[in-house]
Image (cartoon, helix red, strand yellow):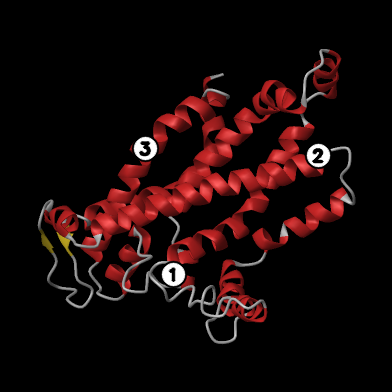
Amino acid sequence: MKKNNYTQYLYFLPVFILIVFIFIYPLCYSIMLSFFDWDLTKPDQHRFIGFQNFIDLFHDPLFLPCIWHGLVFTAFSVVFEYLVGLTIALALNSRFAVLRNVNKALLMLPWAVPIAINSMIWKFLLSPNYGYLNQIFEVLGFNGALTKNWFGDMSTVLPTIIVVNIWRSFPFYTIVLTAALMAIPKEMYEAAEVDGASFFQKFRAVTMPGIASSSAVIVIFHIIWTFSNFDVIYLLTAGGPLNASEVLPTLMYREAFTHFNMGYSSSIGLFLFIVLFIAVGPLYTKFVLKER
C-alpha cells in the first residue's frame, strides 16, 4: 500500500516539471530582475538596486495614463463583449433562430482568425486615405464630419481599439453563453409561462441564474486577459499616437525590447501581476472556486 501511494505521484512528475519550466521559473526570474539594474547592452554590469525600479515606475509620467487607458479599455471591452455575446446567444437559442449551426460557425470567424490578420484588416478598413469606412461616410455626405484618421487621432484611437477588441472577442462569449443557455431545463421556462411570467421576468428569474456561473467565469478571465492585453493594441497603434493608447503591457514591451531595460520592464510586469492578483483574486475565489 505504501509503495502504491508513493508511485501514484510519479505520474504527476512530467506535468510538475513542465509547470516549473514554463511558469514558476520565468515568474521567479522576472521577480528577481525587477530588483536589479539590468541593461541588455551592458551584460556585465548588473547591480542590485532594491525597490528603485518601482520608485521610478511610480514617478514615470506615463504610469498613471497607462493605468487609466488600461481601465477604460478593460471596462468597456468586457461590458460590451458580454452584452453583444449574450444578445446573440439569446437569439441563437430562441425558437425563431434560422440556420443556427451555420450562424454559430460564422460567428466564430473573428475569434478564429489570427490576431495579426484581424489587426491588418481593421487598419485597412479604417485607413484615413483608402479605408472603406471613410469612403462610405464620404458617399453619404459626411465628409469632414465623420471621416477621420481613426488610429491617428488622439480623441478616437482608444474607442476605435475598444470596438476592434469587442468585435474580435464577443464570439467567445456567444459560444460559452449559448452552451449555458442550452443547459437550462426547458421545463423551467414552461413553468414560468404557466405562471404568466413575461419575457423579462423569465430572463431575470430563469435565464440569468442559469448562466450566472458561466458568466462569472468568462468575465473574470476576460478582465485578466484584457487588462494584460498587448497584441491588439501594439499591432494597431503600438501605444500611439503620442501615447494616447499606451497601456502597461505595451510600456513593458518598449522598455524591454526598445530600451533594453529588463529590470525596469520586469518591475512593470510584477506590478501588473500584483494588481490583477489583488483585484481579480477575490472574484475568482468567490465565483469560480465556490462553484467547484
The answer to whether the residue labelled 3 contacts the one labelled 1, judged by CB atoms less than 8 Å apart, is no
Q: Earlier in the sequence, mark 3 or mark 1?
A: 1
Q: What residue is pinned by disc 1?
A: 234
Q: Earlier in the sequence, mark 3 or mark 2?
A: 2
- The answer to which of 50 and 126 lies nearer the viewer is 126
User: Is 80 rendered above or below residue 42?
Assistant: above
Residue type at mark 3 is Ala
- In the picture, measured across the screen, residue 44 lies left or right of residue 71, that is left
- For the residues labelled 1 and 2, the Cα–Cα distance comes to 36 Å
Q: Residues within 10 Å of mark 3 (few under 14, many from 20)?
A: few
What is the secondary structure assignment of the residue under circle 1? helix
Q: Position of residue 57 (x, y in %)?
A: 19, 57
Quadrant containing the N terminus is top right
| Quadrant in which residue 241 is drawn | bottom left
What is the secondary structure assignment of the residue under circle 3? helix
Residue type at mark 1 is Tyr
Residue type at mark 2 is Asn
- The answer to which of 217 and 191 lies nearer the viewer is 191
Q: Which mark is residue 279?
A: 3
**Residue for point 43% across, 73% down:** 237
Whether residue 21 is visible to the viewer of this picture, yes or no, is no
Q: What residue is pinned by disc 2?
A: 93
Q: Position of residue 44 (x, y in %)?
A: 15, 73
Q: Position of residue 112 (x, y in %)?
A: 68, 61
- The answer to which of 262 and 73 lies nearer the viewer is 73
Q: Nearer the viewer, mark 1 or mark 2?
A: 2
What is the secondary structure assignment of the residue under circle 2? helix
- The answer to which of 239 and 39 lies nearer the viewer is 239
Quadrant containing the C terminus is top right
| Quadrant in which residue 155 is drawn | bottom left
- For the residues labelled 3 and 1, the Cα–Cα distance comes to 24 Å
- In the picture, measured across the screen, residue 266 lies left or right of residue 186, that is left
